[in-house]
Amino acid sequence: MSTVDTVSDSRSGTHFWVLSVDKPGRASATRSGTYTPAPGSTRESAYQDIYLSVTNADPILRGATVAFFSLEPNRL
């Protein structure tokens, strides 16, 4: 099972993500957090997990267009 954390805690996830979405004329949002993928996960499945986490948390954002997405390892 993958874990999406929308409250960014740099110690919690293996990856850090940023997602910006927009529904023209209605709403836009940028969220960030950490993510720990399940074994065998793909970048596409991570994107879907994160997108659904963000848009399900705020119903007005459901179906929003993605303006920006970044997913990178969460260590320096």
Image (cartoon, grey):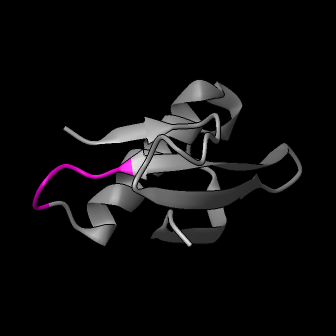
Residue in view at x 78 percent, y 48 percent: 29
Relative to residue 69, is residue 5 drawn left or right?
Answer: left
Nearest the viewer among 27 and 42 is: 42
- What secondary structure is the stretch in magenta mostly built from? loop
Give coordinates of residue 47: x percent, y percent. 41, 60
Residue 47 magenta: no
Q: Check the image and name the residue furthest to the left.
A: 40
Span shown in magenta: 36-40
Relative to residue 30, is residue 15 drawn left or right?
Answer: left
Give coordinates of residue 22: x percent, y percent. 75, 56
Give coordinates of residue 57: x percent, y percent. 59, 26
Relative to residue 46, is residue 13 drawn left or right?
Answer: right
Residue in view at x 66 percent, y 39 percent: 61
Q: Does 59 appear above or below 29?
A: above
Say which quadrant the N terminus sits in. top left
Say which quadrant the C terminus sits in. bottom right
Nearest the viewer among 52 and 23 is: 52
Residue in view at x 40 percent, y 55 percent: 14
Residue in view at x 52 percent, y 44 percent: 11
Q: Check the image and name the residue furthest to the right.
A: 25
Q: Does 67 appear above or below 30?
A: below
Nearest the viewer among 51 and 11 is: 11
- Disc tally is 0
Give coordinates of residue 40: x percent, y percent. 10, 61
